[in-house]
Image: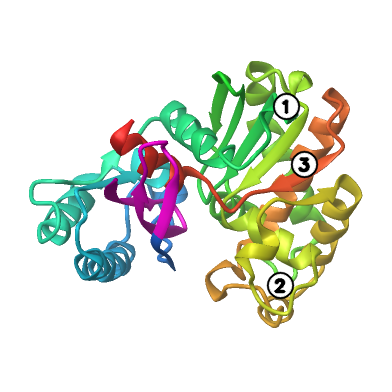
C-alpha cells in the first residue's frame, strides 16, 4: 500500500487527491478537494498570468499542503499544470511560487508542465477504471478551461489522442460577453469551437468509439443539471448517461440564461457560473460531430479523470 498526493492545476481550477494505492492498482480516496482559482484569467489575450491569479492559486495550494500534512503518510506528491501554464510567458513566476508552497511536503518539487498528449493519456487512465472493458473502445473527452483532450483507447491503452486549444474559459473570454450571450456571440463561439476541433477529429478516429466518456467540471456539472439534482452529488453523477437530445436541451437552456439565473441553479459551483455556457456549447458541438461520425448514442459522465491518472502515474 502506498499513499500519494496528486495535484492538477488547470486553467479554471486546482484540485487535490490524496489516495492509497493497493497492490492491484486500485485507488482508495483519503481526501479529494477542488478550488476555482481561474489561473488562466486573461492568458488567451495577454499571454501572461495575472498577479492576482497566481495569488489565488497560491492560497489554494497552501491549503492543499495543509491537507496533505494532516492526512499523514504521503510518500510522493506530484503536481501537474496544463493548458494555461503551457501558454503563459511568465510561467517561471508560477514555478517559483509552487516550489515555495510545496516545500513543506515535497521539498524541491515544482509543478510539471505536461504536454497535451500526456494530459490526454492521464485523463484516459483515470476515466476508464470503473468501466466495463467490453464497452470499449472508449472516447474520453476532458473538457477544461483552456484546452480539451480527445482520447481514443481500450483495455490495452490509448490508440489516438489530441489536445485542442479550446476550453470553457477561452471560449467565454473570446466570444460570450453579453448577459445572456447574443445569437451572434453564440454563432461566433460555435464557429471557433468547430474550427479548433477540426484537426482533433481528423486525428482521433471517433468512428471507432463505442462509448463516449466525459470528465472534468463542465461535464459533471452538466450531468447534475440533466439529473435535476438540488445539489451537487458525486455518487449520483458518476457513470450517469445522457442522450444527445438532452445535451442540446441543456446547452440551449444555459445559453439563454442570465448569469444570475445560472447562479441560482442548485448544483452550480460559483466559480463555474460565468463559463458553464461555453462549456455546454463545446459539449453540444462535440456531440453533433460524434453523432455524425460514430455509432455512439449518448454521453457517460465519470467523476474519475486526470487527477486519478496522476495518482496512478506516481506508482506506475
The answer to which of marks 2 and 1 sits earlier in the sequence is 1
The quadrant of the picture occupied by the C terminus is top left
Q: Percent x, y for residue 196? A: 63, 32
Q: CA distance from mark 3 to mark 1?
A: 27 Å
The answer to whether 114 is drawn above or below residue 245 in the figure is above
Name the disc covering residue 134, or none. Answer: 1
The answer to which of marks 3 and 1 sits earlier in the sequence is 1
Residue at the far right: name it: 245
Q: Would residue 189 be visible to someone looking at this image?
A: no
Q: Quadrant of residue 244?
A: top right
Discs 3/2, front = 3
Q: Which residues are magenta?
A: 1-29
Residue marked by disc 2: 179
Q: Bin the neighbour count of mark 1 within 10 Å (Cα to Cα): few under 14, some 14-19, many 20 and up.
A: few
Looking at this view, is 47 or 9 the one in front?
9
Q: Percent x, y for residue 8? A: 38, 50
From the viewer's perspective, tell me whether residue 145 is left or right of residue 46.
right
Question: Which residue is located at x 38 percent, y 39 percent?
Answer: 312
- Badge 2 marks a residue whose secondary structure is loop
Residues marked 2 and 1 touching at CB (< 8 Å)? no
Looking at this view, is 303 or 97 the one in front?
303
From the viewer's perspective, tell me whether residue 226 is left or right of residue 118.
right
Q: Percent x, y for residue 41? A: 43, 59
Looking at this view, is 42 or 125 the one in front?
125
Question: Which residue is located at x 78 percent, y 20 percent?
Answer: 207
Residue marked by disc 3: 285
Q: Bin the neighbour count of mark 2 within 10 Å (Cα to Cα): few under 14, some 14-19, many 20 and up.
A: few
The answer to which of marks 3 and 2 sits earlier in the sequence is 2
Q: Quadrant of residue 299?
A: top right
Amino acid at each position: 500500500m502506498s499513499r500519494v498526493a496528486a495535484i492538477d492545476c488547470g486553467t479554471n481550477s486546482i484540485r487535490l487527491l490524496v489516495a492509497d494505492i493497493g497492490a492491484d492498482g486500485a485507488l482508495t480516496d483519503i481526501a479529494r478537494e477542488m478550488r476555482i482559482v481561474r489561473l488562466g484569467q486573461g492568458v488567451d489575450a495577454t499571454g501572461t498570468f495575472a498577479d492576482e491569479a497566481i495569488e489565488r492559486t497560491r492560497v489554494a495550494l497552501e491549503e492543499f499542503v495543509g491537507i496533505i500534512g494532516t492526512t499523514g503518510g504521503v510518500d510522493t506528491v506530484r503536481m501537474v499544470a496544463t493548458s494555461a501554464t503551457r501558454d503563459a510567458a511568465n510561467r517561471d513566476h508560477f514555478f517559483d511560487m509552487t516550489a515555495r508552497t510545496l516545500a513543506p511536503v515535497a521539498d524541491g518539487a515544482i509543478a510539471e508542465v505536461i504536454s497535451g498528449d500526456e494530459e490526454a493519456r492521464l485523463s484516459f487512465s483515470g476515466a476508464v477504471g470503473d468501466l466495463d472493458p467490453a464497452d470499449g473502445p472508449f472516447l474520453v473527452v476532458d473538457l477544461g478551461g483552456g484546452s480539451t483532450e480527445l482520447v481514443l483507447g481500450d483495455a490495452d491503452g490509448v490508440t489516438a489522442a489530441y489536445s485542442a486549444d479550446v476550453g470553457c474559459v477561452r471560449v467565454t473570454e473570446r466570444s460570450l460577453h453579453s448577459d445572456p450571450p447574443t445569437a451572434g456571440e453564440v454563432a461566433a463561439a460555435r464557429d471557433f469551437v468547430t474550427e479548433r476541433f477540426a484537426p482533433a477529429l481528423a486525428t482521433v478516429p471517433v468512428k471507432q468509439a463505442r462509448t463516449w466518456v466525459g470528465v472534468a467540471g463542465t461535464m459533471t456539472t452538466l450531468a447534475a443539471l440533466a439529473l435535476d439534482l438540488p445539489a451537487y452529488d458525486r455518487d449520483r453523477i458518476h457513470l450517469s448517461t445522457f442522450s444527445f437530445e438532452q445535451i442540446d436541451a441543456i446547452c440551449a437552456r444555459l445559453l439563454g440564461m442570465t448569469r444570475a439565473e445560472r447562479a441560482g441553479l442548485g448544483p452550480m459551483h460559483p466559480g463555474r457560473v460565468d463559463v458553464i455556457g461555453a462549456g455546454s456549447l463545446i459539449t453540444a458541438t462535440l456531440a453533433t460531430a460524434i453523432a455524425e461520425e460514430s455509432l455512439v448514442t449518448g454521453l457517460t459522465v465519470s467523476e474519475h479523470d486526470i487527477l486519478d491518472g496522476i495518482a496512478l502515474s506516481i506508482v506506475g
